[in-house]
Each structure stands twice: as structure tokens, then as C-alpha cells.
């Protein structure tokens, strides 16, 4: 899609060119860099070649003059041969004026071919004399500024009678410059081509793992959890692929649980609703006129409504715990006393239904927590023990106290939990496989609520269980000092 900013445009072939894509960005960066390099090269050649050449030539002339002066003072007999050779090799005009004679060694033929090459030797000699120095250097340009000469004059004999003059044509060697320019064209072309190819290769290498990942992500978004992310090529893309594979695994798990939950919840809701409906119909059609039968049917409807109510409020509790939306009323209280109240409320049921329930308290153990929520936790453990105690019907509620810790145990000798399922009993909606066979009713939410509440109290908790032998559900809390009478009534509110 082309946008109004012109970032993405269509080219002549109908293909869209996205200037924000990795391919285009790399390509453009490389091309811009190559162009910059070429411009620098051209700039250097055009603006600095001449001045660099002049400086190098001046240094060379001074070195040659030194060598000639040495030759003059040390080995005069070979001066001629040496001067001719130096003049020729370096394209120099050399003139040695002694008191008696003047010797000229002219190696500037190439320069002369390029144009007028004259330098007023007498003038520089006069300038040397006038300067009072041992040597002077001068540069002179012709009117066009293209041809110039570097002149050097030095007194070479002890009595100042001999003067050495060296003139170096400072012609910008047009042939050389032309060659250099031609070479530059080749170099520029090669640099541009190589950078374009490199940029292309790099952009393909950079974008291909990302394109792979995008392809896989699209498949994943269509619900294909089997897709595997592959970020081969770069450490960063491999890391990204690993993170995406993990995310996809988590999504699959969540999706699975969501389906499970929906299936469980709708089943759990449907059963009591069907019962309520059929008993209501029964009252209308059959038992409405018979008060005894009608009341019995109404009792079923009420119990099913209670079941529904419990299920819905458990679901709400889990959802609140999950979203951390639980208000906690923290206080310091005796856990042993709270456990005793739980025991007492169950012992009524115990005696009516033939349960053998025992309470084993320890010394007072004060803890900081939400009393009613911790009672809810203990109630849950005990009601599970009642539900899953099978034929044994023998339940122990025990509290143990060690240094600064108190542990609540609810021990039954009933059906127990298979070892491979024990890790899951705290998960929402989890019910062990044995439940289904036995037809024991439940929502699978009780222990998930217990887990959430105990986590809010930072309490440790767990279960030891053996299938067919029974279970010991426990939680452990830090004890605190018994509060003073005044303080014990105060409540600290905390949002969990
Ligand atoms: P439910 O409503 O099914 O009892 P819970 O969350 O309280 O849900 O328990 C989850 C599952 O853990 C139960 O369905 C049961 O299989 C297992 N469980 C809990 N308590 C006991 C126990 N005392 N003995 C054996 N199994 C238990």
C-alpha cells in the first residue's frame, strides 16, 4: 500500500519499493557510503593533488641540492657525471656558477615540451645575494597559473664564490593527472559495483530470517501451533525465534486450558440447570398437588441452586485471585483457636455421618493474616478430607509448632492421590482421574482458591499422599508474638 508520505512507492514494474525495509535501507546506506567515498577520492585528487605534489617536489629539490653540495665539496672530479644523472632522473635544471665558469645540466626536456620553461637564473642569484642567507627557495607561476617553477639557490663554496641554482618545473603533469583521473573512474565504478553487490547480499542475508519468522508468525496467528520459528543466521534472530517458540507453546497451552475450562464449566453448569428444570417440570406436571412430594422436589431444586451458587462464587473467587482483586483484612490471631472452630463446625457433620474426626492442637500460635480467609483454607482442606476419605472416615486435624513456625495438617486415610497427578491438584478445574470413576462431585476450584489465598499470605503449603492410603494437606505460617490486649483488636487492611 502506498502512503501519502511517499515512503512506499510503486516502481515501473508494479513492484512496491518500501524505503523502510531492511533491504532498501541497507542498499541505500551502502550506495550512499560508496558515493561519499568516491566524492572524497575525487575531491582529494582535484584539490589536493597539486599542492601535495608541489610540497613533495620542494622537499626533493632540497634533498638533491644537499647531495650536490656534498658532491661539490667532497669529490669535485665526479661532480659533472653526478649532476647530469641527477638532472636527468629528476627532470631538473641545474646550474653551477663558479668564479671562472658556469656549468649547466639540463634535464627538463619533458617539461619544456609542455610549454614555455624559462626562469630568470640571474634574478634568483641576485635575490640570494640580497637575502644574505646561504640558500633561498622561490616558486613562480606563469600567467595561467598552470605552469610553475620551483627555484633553489645556494652558496656552495666556503668563500661564497660558487652558487648552485636548481630549477624544478612544477608542471601539473597532465598525463599523470589524466591517468589518475581515468583510474579514479575505474575505481569509482568498481567501488560502486562492489558496494551494491555487498549491500544486496547483506540485505538478503539480513532480511531472510526475519521474513521466515514473519511467515511462521502468520501461520501461528491462523491457529497452527505446530509451526516452528527458525531464526537461523544471526544470534539476535535465533534469540527471537526461541522467544517466539516459547510464546507459541504457551499460547497452545492456554488455548488448551481455555477449551478444557469451557468444557468443564459448561458441563458443571448444565447438570444442575437440567436438574432444576426437570424438577420444576415435575412439580408442574405431577407433584404440584401433593405437598409432601412437591416439597421433596423443591428441596432438590434448592440444593441444585446452592450447588450452582457455590460453583459461580468459586469461579468468581478464582478470577479475583488471578487478577489480584482480593481485599485482605490482616490481623494477628491464634491459628490454633481458628483451627478449633473449623474442627467444631465439622464435628457436628462428623457425628451425623459417622466420621471419626480428631483434633490435635499445639500451644497457642499467633500468626498475621486474614482470619476468615485462612478459615476458608482450613474448611476446604477438611471438606476435601470428608469428600475423599472413602470408607475409612477417619480424619485428623493437627497443628504442630516449631521455632517461629506453625503447621496445620488435615490428614485423611481415604482414596489418596496418584503420584503422577499430585502436582496438578492445585491447578484450576483439575480433578483426579479417580473422581470421575467414583462420581464424586466437585468443581476442581477449591484447591486453586486455597493456593491463591496461601500465596497472598506468603505461606508454604503442600500435600503428601499415597493412592489408596490417604492424604496429608498442610500449610505453614510464621508465628508472631501474642499481641497486647489493646493491639489485638486492631485490624490492618491490605489489598492483596
Ligand atoms: P474438587 O471440587 O474437585 O474437590 P479441589 O480443587 O478441592 O476440587 O481438589 C482438586 C482435586 O484434588 C480433587 O478433585 C481431588 O481429585 C483431589 N483431592 C483434593 N483433596 C483430596 C483428598 N483429601 N484426597 C484425595 N484427593 C483429593
Image: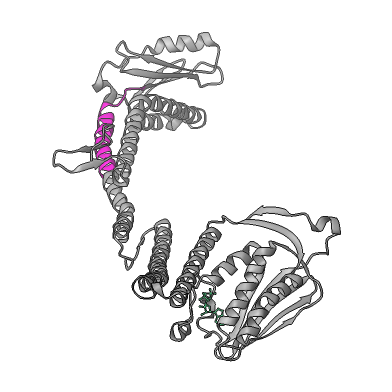
x then y, percent, for residue 193: 25, 43
**Magenta stretch contains residue 171:** yes
What quarter of the picture does the C terminus occupy?
A: bottom right
Taking the spot 31% from the left edge, 55% from the top edge, the residue there is 214
> Splitting the image into four quadrants, where does ligand 1 fall?
bottom right
> Looking at the image, which is closer to me, 77 or 456?
456
**Magenta stretch contains residue 320:** no
Q: Quadrant of residue 474?
A: bottom right
x then y, percent, for residue 383: 59, 77
What quarter of the picture does the N terminus occupy?
A: top left
Task: Say whether residue 485 is left or right of residue 154.
Answer: right
Taking the spot 30% from the left edge, 65% from the top edge, the residue there is 224
> Looking at the image, which is closer to me, 141 or 352?
352
Q: Residue furthest left?
A: 13
> Looking at the image, which is closer to me, 12 or 190?
12
Task: Say whether residue 423 is left or right of residue 112.
Answer: right
* Magenta span dominant secondary structure: helix
What's drawn in magenta, residue-wise? 169-193
Q: Is residue 276 above or below residue 437?
A: above
> Looking at the image, which is closer to me, 266 or 350?
350
Amino acid at each position: 500500500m502506498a502512503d501519502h508520505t511517499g515512503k512506499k512507492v510503486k516502481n515501473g514494474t508494479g513492484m512496491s519499493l518500501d524505503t523502510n525495509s531492511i533491504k532498501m535501507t541497507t542498499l541505500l546506506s551502502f550506495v550512499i557510503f560508496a558515493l561519499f567515498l568516491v566524492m572524497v577520492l575525487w575531491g582529494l585528487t582535484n584539490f589536493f593533488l597539486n599542492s601535495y605534489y608541489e610540497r613533495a617536489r620542494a622537499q626533493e629539490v632540497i634533498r638533491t641540492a644537499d647531495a650536490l653540495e656534498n658532491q661539490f665539496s667532497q669529490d669535485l672530479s665526479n661532480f659533472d657525471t653526478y649532476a647530469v644523472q641527477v638532472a636527468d632522473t629528476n627532470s631538473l635544471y641545474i646550474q653551477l656558477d663558479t668564479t671562472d665558469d658556469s656549468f649547466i645540466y639540463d634535464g627538463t626536456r619533458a617539461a619544456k615540451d609542455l610549454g614555455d620553461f624559462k626562469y630568470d637564473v640571474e634574478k634568483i642569484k641576485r635575490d640570494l645575494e640580497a637575502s644574505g642567507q646561504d640558500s633561498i627557495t622561490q616558486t613562480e607561476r606563469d600567467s595561467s597559473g598552470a605552469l610553475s617553477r620551483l627555484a633553489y639557490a645556494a652558496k656552495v663554496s666556503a668563500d661564497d664564490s660558487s652558487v648552485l641554482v636548481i630549477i624544478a618545473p612544477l608542471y601539473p603533469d597532465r598525463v599523470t593527472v589524466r591517468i589518475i583521473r581515468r583510474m579514479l573512474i575505474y575505481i569509482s565504478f568498481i567501488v560502486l559495483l562492489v558496494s551494491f553487490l555487498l549491500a544486496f547480499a547483506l540485505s538478503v542475508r539480513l532480511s531472510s530470517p526475519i521474513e521466515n519468522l514473519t511467515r511462521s508468525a502468520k501461520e501461528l496467528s491462523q491457529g497452527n501451533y505446530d509451526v516452528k520459528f527458525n531464526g537461523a543466521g544471526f544470534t539476535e534472530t535465533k534469540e527471537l525465534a526461541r522467544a517466539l517458540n516459547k510464546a507459541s507453546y504457551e499460547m497452545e497451552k492456554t488455548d488448551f486450558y481455555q477449551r478444557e475450562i469451557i468444557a468443564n464449566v459448561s458441563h458443571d453448569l448444565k447438570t444442575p440447570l437440567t436438574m432444576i428444570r426437570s424438577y420444576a417440570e415435575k412439580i408442574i406436571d405431577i407433584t404440584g398437588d401433593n405437598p409432601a412430594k412437591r416439597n421433596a422436589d423443591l428441596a432438590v431444586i434448592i440444593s441444585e441452586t446452592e450447588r450452582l451458587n457455590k460453583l459461580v462464587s468459586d469461579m468468581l473467587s478464582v478470577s479475583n485471585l488471578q487478577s489480584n482483586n482480593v481485599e485482605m483484612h490482616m490481623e494477628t490471631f491464634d491459628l490454633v483457636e481458628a483451627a478449633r472452630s473449623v474442627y467444631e463446625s465439622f464435628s457436628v457433620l462428623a457425628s451425623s455421618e459417622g466420621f471419626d474426626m480428631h483434633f490435635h492442637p499445639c500451644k497457642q500460635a499467633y500468626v498475621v493474616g486474614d482470619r476468615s480467609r485462612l478459615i476458608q483454607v482450613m474448611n476446604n482442606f477438611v471438606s476435601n478430607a470428608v469428600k475423599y476419605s472413602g470408607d475409612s472416615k477417619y480424619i485428623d486435624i493437627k497443628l504442630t509448632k516449631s521455632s517461629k513456625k506453625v503447621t496445620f495438617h488435615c490428614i485423611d486415610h481415604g482414596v489418596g492421590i496418584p503420584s503422577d497427578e499430585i502436582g496438578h491438584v492445585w491447578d484450576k478445574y483439575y480433578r483426579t482421574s479417580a473422581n470421575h470413576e467414583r462420581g464424586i462431585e466437585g468443581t476442581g476450584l477449591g484447591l486453586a482458591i486455597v493456593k491463591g489465598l496461601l500465596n497472598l499470605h506468603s505461606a508454604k503449603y503442600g500435600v503428601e499422599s499415597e493412592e489408596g492410603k490417604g492424604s496429608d494437606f498442610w500449610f505453614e505460617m510464621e508465628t508472631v508474638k501474642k499481641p497486647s490486649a489493646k493491639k489485638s483488636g486492631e485490624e490492618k487492611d491490605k489489598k492483596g
